[in-house]
Amino acid sequence: PDDIVLLLLLQLTSGGRPHYYVSYRRNTFAQMKLPKYSLPKDMHVISTDENQVFAAVQEWNQNDTYNLYISDTRGIYFTLALENVKSSQGLEGNVMIDLYEVAGIKGMFLANKKIDNQVKTFITYNKGRDWSLLPAPHTDLRGNAIHCLLPYCSLHLHLKVSDNPYTSGNIASRDTAPSIIVASGNIGAELSDNDISMFVTSDAGNTWRQIFEEEHSVLYLDQGGVLVAMKHTSLPIRHLWLSFDEGRSWSKYSFTSLPLFVDGVLGEPGEETLIMTVFGHFSHRSEWQLVKIDYKSIFDRRCAEEDYRPWQLHSQGEACIMGAKRIYRKRKSEKKCMQGKYAGAMTSEPCVCTEADFDCDYGYERHSNGQCLPAFWYNPSSLSKDCSLGQSYLNSTGYRKVVSNNCTDGVRERYTAKPQQCPGKPPQGLRIITSDGKLTAEQGHNVTFLVQLEEGDLQRSLIQVDFGDGIAVSYANLSSTEDGIKHIYQNVGIFRVTVLVENSLGSDNAVLYLHVTCPLEHVHLSLPFVTTKNKEINATAVLWPSQVGTLTYVWWFGNNTEPLITLEGSIAFTFSAEGMNTITVQVSAGNTILQDTKTIAVYGKF
């Protein structure tokens, strides 16, 4: 959707930890905020529906599971929705997360969670705020009672969806049949690949019925008014099963005179379709066969108003789902008529907000008493520290309304974050730098200083700057210093520049040592042309101009391979042998190095 533009960028730090970024309404990208204890090594975006990101994150200590996180409306702050969701690898090496979004009912998901090496199926009706196990059917296909007591025993479903449009996956639901879910699974303590049966719910997961003892492909026709089931088998078949009462009863029909190896089944597009196509082959050597089946002749009329009954969406008796009571229109099970176009919910009435409509906000965790309290790693006052005096921020109550929840009034006002003025703070983290980041400046030229503050507000503080050359200035607010504070030094030298920032709550100061120089134009080495051995003589480097700032002198004597380095422009030395000797001095001033060389004659007597 246009509201959330998601871009994942991998940035490897020195520790090799990836970071992810999100752009909301095409604004600048901001780093996605997971709980601080989260150290993700992999992430997959499950959906970005309804202005919210559902993401699966694999932590550093996970191998075959992922944690589900759900974001705020900007896609920045993520909270944990469910831990240790089972994952597997597809045929092409892609990661598949065992999470299924039920079509037609927003906020409803099924997930397979790993608990103590057992995989169990959970359901949520409010986008992951609350999860519960699936109740098993009361009876099996033969009407025998099933003794399965929650939480020790429950129904578990396979949640893989087929990428092939011609074959069905393990689970199916449709927008136009919001209460019907058909899936393969098993009853017991955990999900198993053995003893797989087919199950159906016609009340959005509240109760389930076993419909087949083997895996079948199921197609929805006429908005779920007709369910078509075909057995999963490698053997040729000629029969299929039809249900006109949401899977409560099934009738056997023959669709071909000769047994057919079925390769795929496809329903015709359109809401009112009653046509399906089966394609396969009669033998392994024969060509493909297409069998088109039209069920319109089964119905002799379209449904009228009296053929329907109201049905209220609920979760184990709780009628308020995602902050609204929704009543749908269902065809009466004994009526056999064609439904036509899907009309959606008959009525939708908002509920009064309760605590159940709110999840814990970022940085908060739900405790055993049901309250959302700050997590051990989170400081609630950190948000106020990120803003300046005069601005405002949203002061969290510890709760945030589940996205797309339509509840009104009630506790909404009490649980909703309130805009609050940013508090004043004493200045902290003050520093002064030059605009080019250097610690040198040239005599007679403008040097620009920048004053920076980590905490506090320069606009409401007194700023005093002493340039160290006898000149100081004061500013009452930042408006005069946004482009920097300019100053010209008339003399060379090392100057101690100090800045003091203070407000009614406190003060802070910082120091910068600035080297002011001027260009060095000429160097002359002054020393006698002749001397006697073992007699001390002086050599002096004469500069123009004489004052250029901090200098380094490098002296080379004769054939010596190591120089003498000094900060003074004069040295004393002696020669112990007769002969002609050269002396070179190099003067380093900033990026400039100039030199001069002289020759001196050394005699035994003179």
Image (tube, rainbow, N blue to C red):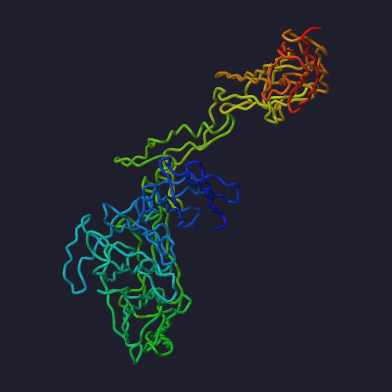
- Whether residue 118 sits left or right of residue 490 in the image: it is left
Residue at 74% across / 28% down in the picture?
591
Quarter residue 183 falls in:
bottom left
- Whether residue 3 sits left or right of residue 141 in the image: it is right
Q: Quadrant of the N terminus?
A: bottom right
Q: Quadrant of the C terminus?
A: top right
Q: Nearer the viewer, residue 542 or 38?
A: 542
Q: Nearer the viewer, residue 198 or 604?
A: 604
Q: Is residue 591 above or below residue 226?
A: above
Residue 375: x and y, percent? 38, 37
Number of callouts: 0
Residue 134: x and y, percent? 28, 60
Residue at 80% across / 22% down in the picture?
596
Q: Is residue 412 above or below residue 497?
A: below
Q: Nearer the viewer, residue 335 or 438?
A: 438
Q: Outermost residue, bottom direction?
A: 257
- Whether residue 164 sits left or right of residue 467 in the image: it is left
Quarter residue 498 falls in:
top right
Q: Is residue 14 above or below residue 509?
A: below
